[in-house]
Image: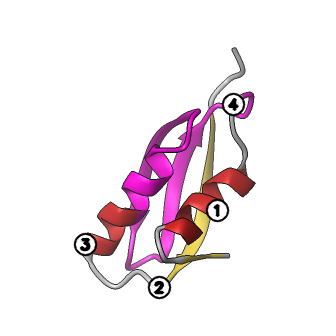
Amino acid sequence: MTAAQTEVVPVHGMHCGGCERAVSQAVRSVPGVGGARADFVAEEVEVTFDPGQTDLDAIRAAVRDAGFTPA
């Protein structure tokens, strides 16, 4: 098993707590993600994941699929 990695991904388009929940849930649904905490004020999501199972491209794709713009 690979050591967990934590990264911050900028996310544009979040405006409220509901947006935070949508982004967090979308990112948590990616296999290999252990946790995700979105912050609409900071316009970012902090993600802890296993780099042996997923990568930032998959995480950004989940953000896009939820209707937001990853940077």
Where is 36 relative to 45, above or below? above
Position of residue 42 measured from the top left corner of the image (x, y, whole percent): 45, 76
Cα separation, mark 4 vs mark 3, equals 29 Å
16 displayed left or right of 46: left
Quadrant position of the N terminus in the picture: top right
- SS class, disc 1: helix
Q: Residue at x 38, y 76 (%)?
A: 40
21 displayed left or right of 23: left
Cα separation, mark 2 vs mark 3, equals 12 Å
Q: Residue at x 72, y 34 (%)?
A: 51
Name, please, the residue furthest toward the top.
1
**Is residue 33 a member of the stretch shown in magenta?**
yes
- SS class, disc 4: loop
Q: State which tag comes first along the sequence, 4 or 2.
A: 2
Name, please, the residue furthest toward the front.
65
Q: How is the image coloured?
A: secondary structure
Q: Badge 2: few (under 14), some or many (20 or more) residues near its Cα, within 10 Å?
A: few
Report the residue marked by disc 2.
13
- Label number found at residue 17: 3
Q: Which residues make up the magenta segment?
A: 23-52
Position of residue 68 measured from the top left corner of the image (x, y, whole percent): 51, 77
Q: Badge 4: few (under 14), some or many (20 or more) residues near its Cα, within 10 Å?
A: few
Position of residue 33 measured from the top left corner of the image (x, y, whole percent): 54, 38
Q: Badge 1: few (under 14), some or many (20 or more) residues near its Cα, within 10 Å?
A: many
Report the residue marked by disc 1.
60
Q: State which tag comes first along the sequence, 3 or 1.
A: 3
In the rendered structure, which amino acid carries the disc numbered 3? Gly
